[in-house]
Image: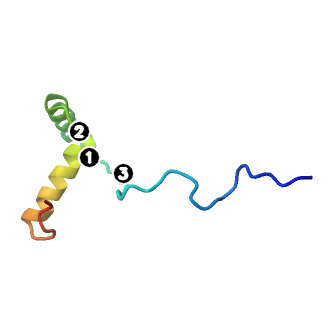
């Protein structure tokens, strides 16, 4: 039997990492509805909105330096 080059773990295979971490959170329905409404009117994704809000909070509270 001949060894196959298909399948299995290979160096450099797979989707490259893009420097983000995925989180799963649970929030009240009322908050989720407000986020959806804002994102629809501002034409942004939920991820963009939550990223901006969390980053802003971290900067305002001294946990993080402002990004350029």
Residue 8 percent location from the top left of the image: 69, 55
Residue labelled with disc 3: 24
Residue labelled with disc 1: 27
Numbered disc 3: secondary structure: loop
**In the picture, residue 10 is in which quadrant?**
bottom right
Kindly indicate whether the residue at mark 3 contacts the one at mark 1 (C-beta within 8 angstroms). no
Which residue is at a point 19% across and 41% down the rendered structure image? Answer: 31
Kindly indicate whether the residue at mark 2 contacts the one at mark 1 (C-beta within 8 angstroms). yes
9 and 12: which is toward the camera:
12
Local crowd size for mark 1, using a 10 Å CA cut-off: few (<14), some (14–19), many (≥20): few
Q: Which residue extends farthest bottom?
A: 62
Residue 32 to residue 20: above or below = above
Residue 44 percent location from the top left of the image: 21, 36
The residues tagged by marks 1 and 2 sit, at their Cα atoms, a distance apart of 7 Å
Local crowd size for mark 3, using a 10 Å CA cut-off: few (<14), some (14–19), many (≥20): few
Numbered disc 1: secondary structure: loop
């Amino acid at each position: 039997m001949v060894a196959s080059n298909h399948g299995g773990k290979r160096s450099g295979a797979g989707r490259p990492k893009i420097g983000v971490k995925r989180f799963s959170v649970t929030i009240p329905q009322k908050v989720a509805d407000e986020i959806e409404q804002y994102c629809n009117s501002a034409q942004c994704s939920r991820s963009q909105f939550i990223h901006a809000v969390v980053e802003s909070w971290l900067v305002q509270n001294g946990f993080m330096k402002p990004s350029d």
